[in-house]
Image (tube, rainbow, N blue to C red):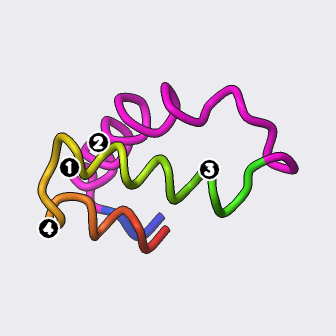
Amino acid sequence: MNFKPTSYDTEKTVIEARIIPALGKVKLQALTPRAIKTFYAELRKTYSKEYVRPYTAF
């Protein structure tokens, strides 16, 4: 609700392009800290720490 339309679009794009393909099939109850850390590690192989850091706050 507090996002500007452009911020919302950017966040939606990141979720659809990065998070859902990697973690979308994992049931929330089965999502572990290890799976999340692995996800971030995979992102860091392609993207800089500065790119990945804002998404670790979710």
Residue lying furthest right: 29
The magenta span reads 4-30
Viewer-proximal residue among 8 and 18: 18
Q: Is residue 3 above or below residue 21?
A: below
Label 2, label 4: how many angstroms apart (C-alpha)?
20 Å
Task: Describe the element under mark 3 as helix, strand or loop.
Answer: helix
Task: Specify whether 41 is left or right of 38.
Answer: left
Label 3, label 4: how many angstroms apart (C-alpha)?
21 Å
Residue 55 in which image quadrant: bottom left
Task: Describe the element under mark 1 as helix, strand or loop.
Answer: helix
Q: Say what amino acid the circle numbered 4 marks.
A: Glu
Viewer-proximal residue among 24 and 13: 24
Q: Say what amino acid the circle numbered 2 marks.
A: Asp
Q: Is residue 11 above or below residue 55?
A: above
Query: What residue is at 34 percent from the left and 49 percent from the top?
Result: 11
* The label number, if any, that marks residue 6 in the structure image: 1
Viewer-proximal residue among 56 and 9: 56
* The label number, if any, that marks residue 50 in the structure image: 4
Q: Are marks 3 and 2 in contact (CB under 8 Å)?
A: no
Q: Are marks 2 and 4 in contact (CB under 8 Å)?
A: no
Q: Residues within 10 Å of mark 1 (few under 14, many from 20)?
A: few
- Does the segment drawn in magenta span residue 27? yes
Label 3, label 1: how many angstroms apart (C-alpha)?
29 Å
First in sequence: mark 3 vs mark 2: 2
Query: What residue is at 25 percent from the left and 52 percent from the top?
Result: 44
Residue 9 in which image quadrant: top left
Q: Say what amino acid the circle numbered 3 marks.
A: Ala
Residue 40: horizontal and vertical position, in percent? 40, 54
Report the residue marked by disc 3.
35
Q: Say what amino acid the circle numbered 1 marks.
A: Thr
Q: Residues within 10 Å of mark 4 (few under 14, many from 20)?
A: few
* The label number, if any, that marks residue 9 in the structure image: 2
